[in-house]
Image (tube, helix red, strand yellow):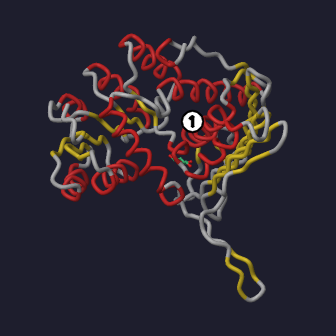
Amino acid sequence: MNERALRIGVIGVGGMGARHARNLAGAVARGRVAAVMDVDTVRASAVAEECGGARVYDDALALIRDPQVDAVVIASPDPTHAALAQACLAVGKPVLCEKPLATNLQDARAVVEAEAALGRRLIQVGFMRVYDPSHQDVKAVVTSGRIGRPLFFRGYHTNTSQDGLPRTLDDVVVNSAVHDIHSARWLLDDEATEVFIQHIPWNPNDPTTCRLVTVQIRFARGGLAFIEMNADAGYGYEVTAAVVGEQGAVESQALASPAVRIGGVRSQTVDPDWLVRFNTAYTREIQAWTEDALAGRYTGPSAWDGYMALAIAEAALESARVGRPVAVKAMERPEIYGG
Ligand code: ISE
């Protein structure tokens, strides 16, 4: 591998993949967009040109096997993630895979098993909040011990619908709340044992749809989490993460914008979506991943983190079906993830 610049192939250049490609081209000193794949080749060509003339593919496997590609970013539709991550493992290339790692636990488990069989980590999952300065401040306070033993995680997460179309409960949990589930594990530094969810359907007569969901999680050392995920808050995009400890509490900054007071009114702008709110986090994520891949070290969220977030999500969906708390069933953690 070229030690000076990592040659990266980006699979899927819709919203998220295009952002990764642009960040690579503009903000990553030792990374270069070498190839771009999308089923929409017009879109792929436009992004490739913008990123300095990368090769264009309409076949993800061909990009993965390209000897001029050292590492791969997977940002194609969710159902393709697991198989493409497996293909990268087969050729020994580092991967930054957008979340979710898979759309079901069985596929996520197969990825974890394949990586464990390889005996080394190659996959990072795109839980970018761990690179958000405000989340990192919360983590630093928790690990400093200043608030004592962490007892409780509280997550607040809003989306605002662009198209007004109903979302399914599966999608809201596996695609959106999965971030907060990861934040809870990361900030409490513990594994979940039980989960209970309740939701308000988007269409009152169809319980498979979801407008707002609450997720309660119990952790192995006794900690608890409560997540409120609103699929259409109607006002903007917001995420906060809070931890309550035995001797204090810490909460991330909800909004990055300044609070303005004019004419008897105090106002603050709410970001429209995650691309704006987590702009810094996405840049830092791809910078860190590139440097890690060049150094052959793996410090970001792992395939195990992707698997566990899905194990909790699947138990949560089961909880919605049966109407009571459900135990989180997970495989044993393989050695490469810290046994
Ligand atoms: C989206 O895919 C993301 O990853 C965002 O961070 C999350 O807030 C949103 O709910 C997801 O749909």
Quadrant of the frame with the C terminus: top right
Q: Position of residue 266 (x, y in %)?
A: 74, 78
Going by the image, does 117 lie left or right of 93? right
Going by the image, does 315 lie left or right of 323? left
- In the image, is residue 211 above or below residue 219? below
Q: Position of residue 250 (x, y in %)?
A: 74, 48
Is residue 92 or residue 328 the one in the foreground? 92
Q: Secondary structure at mark 1?
A: helix
Going by the image, does 206 lie left or right of 174? right
- The residue where tag 1 is placed is 174
Q: Specify few, some or many for label 1: CA neighbours under 10 Å numbering under 14, 14-19, or 20 or more.
A: many
Give the total of numbered labels: 1
* Residue type, label 1: Val
Identify which residue is drawn at 69% across, 32% down. 188
Identify which residue is drawn at 69% across, 43% down. 141
Q: Position of residue 55 (x, y in %)?
A: 15, 45
- In the image, is residue 277 above or below residue 123? below
Q: Residue furthest bottom?
A: 263
- In the image, is residue 335 above or below residue 126? above
Is residue 250 or residue 212 the one in the foreground? 250
Identify which residue is drawn at 35% across, 32% down. 95
Residue 321 occupies which quadrant of the picture?
Answer: top right
Is label 1 within 8 A of ligand 1 (CB to nearest ligand atom)?
no
Is residue 154 or residue 86 the one in the foreground? 154
Is residue 140 or residue 44 the one in the foreground? 140
Identify which residue is drawn at 71% across, 81% down. 261
Q: Residue furthest right?
A: 247
